[in-house]
Amino acid sequence: MIPLLSVVVPFHDVEAYITECLKSLAAQTLEDIEVILVDDGSEDGSRRVAEDFAARDERFVIVAQRNLGPGPARNEGVRHARGTYLAFADSDDVVPPHAYELLVGSLAETGSDLACGAVGRLVDGRLEESTLHEKVFRRPQLCTHITDKQVLVRDRTVWNKVYRRAFWERCGLAFPTGIYEDVPVAMQAHVLATSVDMVGDVVYHWRRRESGTTSITQRRTEPANLYERLAAIRAVRAFLEEHAPDLLDGFDALVLEKDILFLFQALESCDECGPVLELAHAWLAELSVRALATAPSLRRLELHLVKRGLVAELRKVRAFRRAREGGTRIVPRGLRVTNWYGDYPFFRNRRLRIPDEVFDARDELKLVAKVDACEWTGAEYQLRGHVSFHRVDRKVAKVGLWLCDGRRRVPLEVRRSGRHGVVAAIDPRRLGGGKNWKLQVRAELRGLVLTGWCRDGDTGPTWRFSVPGRSRTGMETIQ
């Protein structure tokens, strides 16, 4: 019988983790699967564990090859795959029970070429959100594409997905050699797919190893590892330049957000930094001028120091960043004309003479406006909220509030309460019945004006106020 899904699992010296991985595959609610275990030249007890599973469950098949690395091992597994659909799992990770049923079911319903889902990070036995995927799957969507949903540029892994095997073969997808072999393939698949399904559920548990030999991604500050990562970046950029140039800015921004950290960490720990600096210059030469210029101000400062080979200063800035996990400040400077700069080391340092524009953080200023409570007093509603500028440790000078229903704007009288608190009264008689209102805010400080909508609490959606009609206790509010 031809299985519905083939799962390819390469393994090499992972005796401490492979049992948990294979148990999770055996427990899938989608039972019509085959698991192709590719022994990539293991020298520990991993092969014995795989053989035990294969002896107990005929859905598990073992394929052996000499140690060629994860890319060739995955390719070998694909050559043996018989399923209509194709998936990959790393032998030290875990797949949640309903993952493949969910992903295959989505593809069967929509006809898309691949389906992908959210990822959890296994850290010391606890499941956390994967910071690599954290912004991707907040708004699930079926039958979309990376050119329409450009946040998928951040989805660079192959193991949180199920692929239609006919699509995989039609596009000639194959893993290169090297240790970041999945990044180019994941990007190629996203671009070449006719449509993609995004599901919001966590479909993969990505482990950070606790003991034994560290994984490839945990050796990422080693020079050889950094060269391999650069090769993957070059491969992706070359493909995007030919097939999807509109995605280059997003990919470069992701490299500057995530990948560049490993170069910084290498420069923080190296004794002889010359080779790492050469490698860093090669990395930066690959990225667009636009991406480098539009990076956040603190990242621009780090990049500026790297370009000039100022390793000691870079280390100080990196320590400064880590010491301020709650966030760095943005401060206004200037008398007649106010500019907004990151409050970082070496600003206007006479010795270094770093240009002011490196520190320019005006584009990073954001309005923080929220409603904390709205209570009926017997005659009116009393609204309490908060208005501030994110990362600016100053009281907003002027605050204006308006209720808006799409056609009318009703101004509210605002009273300040404490450093960032605001209080306003809502008289329902001014609004009429059955209207759905949102609260708009205008905030001003040192000539900077920001406008936006108030949110419901710290993390809620846009705050809304409706007046359906009178009752014996006064007006009723639905929020």
Image (cartoon, grey):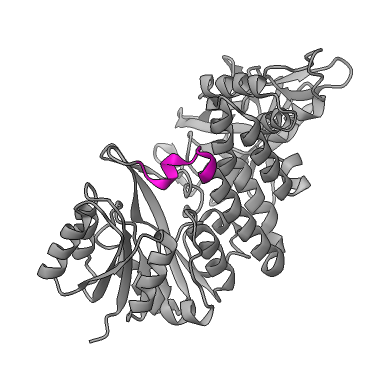
Task: Say which of 244 and 305 sits in front.
Answer: 305
128 w.r.t. 150: above or below: above
Question: Can residue 416 be seen here?
Answer: yes
Indicate the quadrant containing the N terminus: top left, top right, bottom left or bottom right.
bottom left
Please give the count of numbered marks on the rendered protein. Answer: 0
Q: Quick check: is 275 in the magenta stretch?
A: no
446 w.r.t. 362: above or below: above
Q: Quick check: is 222 in the magenta stretch?
A: yes
Task: Say which of 200 and 381 sits in front.
Answer: 200
Task: Say which of 431 and 107 sits in front.
Answer: 107
- Whether residue 387 sits left or right of residue 115 in the image: it is right
Provide residue 63's location: percent of width, then percent of height.
Answer: 28, 70
Residue at 23% from the left image edge and 54% from the top image edge: 18
Residue at 51% from the left image edge and 45% from the top image edge: 225
Task: Say which of 361 and 350 sits in front.
Answer: 350
Q: Quadrant of residue 102?
A: bottom left
- Whether residue 109 sits left or right of residue 384 in the image: it is left
Residue at 67% from the left image edge and 35% from the top image edge: 296
Provide residue 221's location: percent of width, then percent of height.
Answer: 51, 37
Provide residue 327's location: percent of width, then percent of height.
Answer: 56, 25
Q: Quadrant of residue 341?
A: top right
In the rendered structure, which segment of residues is drawn in magenta?
214-224
- Whether residue 38 sits left or right of residue 396 in the image: it is left
25 w.r.t. 378: above or below: below
Q: Residue furthest left?
A: 56
Question: Can residue 422 be seen here?
Answer: no
Provide residue 413's location: percent of width, then percent of height.
Answer: 65, 27
Q: Residue furthest right?
A: 336
